[in-house]
Image (cartoon, rainbow, N blue to C red):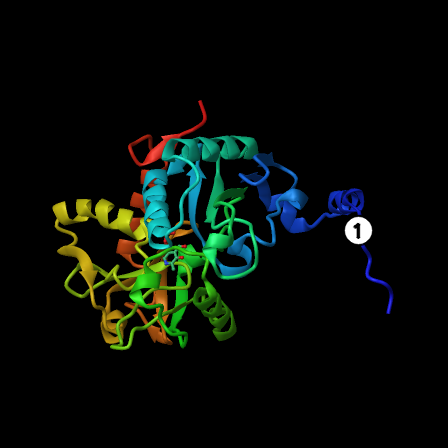
Amino acid sequence: MDRPLILSPEEIYRRLCEQSYNYHSKYLAMYSSWFGGIVRDPSFMLMPIDDHMVHRGDGVFEVFKCVGGRLYLVNQHLDRLERSAAVAELKIPMSRQELLEVVKQTVLSAGEKDCLIRLFVSRGPGGFSARPSESIGSQVYIVVTTIPQHPKEHYAKGVKVKTSRIPMKPPFFASVKSCNYLPNVLMSKEAEEEGVEFTISVDERGNIGEGPTENIGIITTDYAFLVPRFNKVLRGITISRMMELAGELIKAKVLSHIGEADIPLEEAYRAQEVMMFGTTFDVLPVVMFNNKKIGNGQPGPFYKKFLKLLREDMSTDSEVTLKIYD
Ligand SMILES: Cc1ncc(COP(=O)(O)O)c(C=O)c1O
């Protein structure tokens, strides 16, 4: 066997500079508190291997977007980040104001008015055990990328879902957006293997939960917009905003009720409409659930109204958007 190659820092630098992958074109900028600044070359968007977020999943994160130069629902995302950090007993190493400022600077460095921001707060570097006390201090990493586009066909014709075989996270963990995403990863893998867009978790009593990284909601036969209880699934920012915006449809007497509920699988099958909600795609219509047609098997009128309400909401100057470009 050849002797293992020991690389000098200069050689590592040279090799990283030479790296070039197609997916790099989607990575626009990264802030690292460990580096103390912003990196624009994707080959240098790196983090220390002894950061406990790498080897123990000991970190929390948020994903939000910038639409037309406006950070959409950024305060709601930072509120959830703070709640997740509190459950993980993880100190965010900067004030809310400082964090927001670094987010803005990283997005401005990315140079795209439409982009996706992933914000991680990690336990930080220092040793390889599971003990957080080993770490020398929590870190912040922010990666700005282009927004992944869902195929247009999913919006126009709908998506298929199936129930998942992966056990649901216990409520304590389901409500935290931590970097422990193995169950979610296995659900995504399952969806690919099953030939559907998403699989949906189901609790021990047969009530629906959520997708790998998205919420689900239904329009019942009596015109209620129901979502699974947030004590069992992640309190999605998109679906929560949708519940607020849909208030307009209650006033117009188009919807009868909006709320959280236990939703048995059979109720989802019977629903007029089933929809998925998430930051990257907003809302998608579900037309098949476990090979059963939902409604008439076409995207329904509520889905179209919901998508319109959300898209208008994110492209208007308001208290839920933070304009960062002059
Ligand atoms: C497990 C899980 N559920 C739901 C969602 C949807 O949340 P949001 O609307 O905040 O993107 C996510 C988002 O990543 C998630 O990871």
Q: 280 left or right of 243?
A: right
Quadrant housing residue 91: top left
Which residue is the extreme one toward the front?
133
The spot of residue 102 in percent (x, y) is 47, 33
Q: Which residue is labeled 1 in the image?
A: 7
Mark 1 lies on a secondary structure that is: loop
Give the quarter of the figure containing the N terminus.
Answer: bottom right
Vertical placement of 261 versus 113: above or below? below
Which residue is the extreme one toward the right?
2
Looking at this view, is 6 or 244 the one in front?
Answer: 6
Which residue is the extreme one toward the top?
326
Looking at this view, is 66 or 15 the one in front?
Answer: 15
* Amino acid type, callout 1: Leu
Residue at (24%, 75%) from the top-left corner?
A: 266
Q: Residues within 10 Å of mark 1 (few under 14, many from 20)?
A: few
Quadrant housing residue 127: bottom right
The spot of residue 51 in percent (x, y) is 55, 52
Count the numbered circles shown.
1
Q: Is mark 1 within 8 Å of ligand 1?
A: no
Q: 223 left or right of 83?
A: left
Residue at (49%, 61%) from the top-left corner?
A: 130
Quadrant housing residue 245: top left
Vertical placement of 146 versus 203: above or below? above
Residue at (36%, 68%) from the top-left corner?
A: 169
Give the quarter of the figure containing the C terminus.
Answer: top left
Vertical placement of 203 versus 258: above or below? below
Regarding ligand 1, which quadrant of the image does it lie in?
bottom left
